[in-house]
Image (spheres, rainbow, N blue to C red):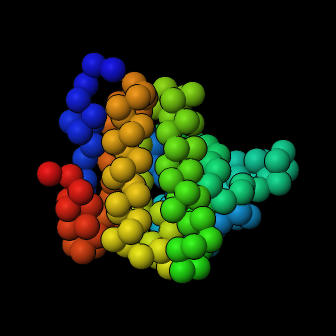
Amino acid sequence: MSDAPISRLRIVQGDITKLATTAIVNAANSSLLGGGGVDGAIHRAGGPQILAECQQIRARQGGCKVGQAVITSGGRLPAAHVIHTVGPHWNGGHKGEPDKLASCYRSSWQLALENQLESVAFPGISTGIYGYPKAEAAAVAVREVRQWLAAHEWPREVVLVAFDEESKQLYEQHVP
Ligand code: AR6
């Protein structure tokens, strides 16, 4: 590990579909067939190639479980790849949600490691339709980034993407 982990973490505000990182992460559902929120935005911007690859993955392994991740190409997106992970529904916080959310980040980085992806950008997994409180999700995300980067060379850079100003501030609270 040559780099100080924190220098490999960037927080940006905006639309993740516009980012030219090597991969962007999709907050998908277990069907991998698309949906609303960032999932809908990624499939709209990336075009039909992404869904076609998701369907091949479904045919092979029957979708994706909560906390796991799969990888496709990025279709027409500026990002070369999309890592699809399935976050937990928020059910009050005592149904293993923090562990499941942490597993989403780790599974995504594992794919980045295996595929030697330079940079990976994450939306706030589970913090929209799935109802995970943004402050608690931000704490999990930053903790997991630190732990992963301290122990692994790949990905070189992690970008946490805040869709709104509030989310950006929540991330920044954890990153001095
Ligand atoms: N760029 C960056 N962040 C975004 C964007 C965007 N273009 N659009 C939304 N967000 P959500 P979930 C933020 O609901 O909670 C889908 O139907 C948004 O503000 O997309 O994991 C799937 O198919 C929020 O902070 O994902 C699943 O069924 C975060 O992305 C379900 O929603 C995640 O919100 C997954 O729900």
Q: Quadrant of the N terminus?
A: top left
- Horizontal side, residue 107 vs residue 15: left or right: right
Give the camera-side residue of 153 and 117. Answer: 153
Residue extending farthest front: 94
Describe residue 17's horizontal placement relative to residue 72 as left or right: left
The x, y position of residue 63, in whole percent, is 76, 56
Taking the spot 41% from the left edge, 58% from the top edge, the residue there is 140
Residue 90 percent coordinates (x, y) = 55, 76
Q: Nearer the viewer, residue 15 or 63?
A: 63
Left or right: where does residue 99 sit relative to residue 136?
right
Q: Taking 158 as reference, is 127 above or below it?
A: below
Q: In the image, residue 167 lies at what x, y percent?
A: 28, 70
**Relative to residue 149, is residue 93 depicted above or below?**
below
On screen, residue 11 above or below 73: below
Q: Residue at x 37, y 72 (%)?
A: 134
Q: Residue placed at 56% from the left, 51% from the top?
A: 103
- Number of numbered discs present? 0
Can the viewer see residue 123?
Answer: yes
As drawn, which residue projects farthest toward the top? 2
Q: Residue at x 64, y 46 (%)?
A: 70
Q: Is 94 placed above or below 105 here?
A: below
Q: Position of residue 136 (x, y in %)?
A: 38, 68
Left or right, 79 with respect to 86, comes to left
Name the image quarter holding residue 18.
Answer: bottom left
Residue 104 visible in the snapshot = no
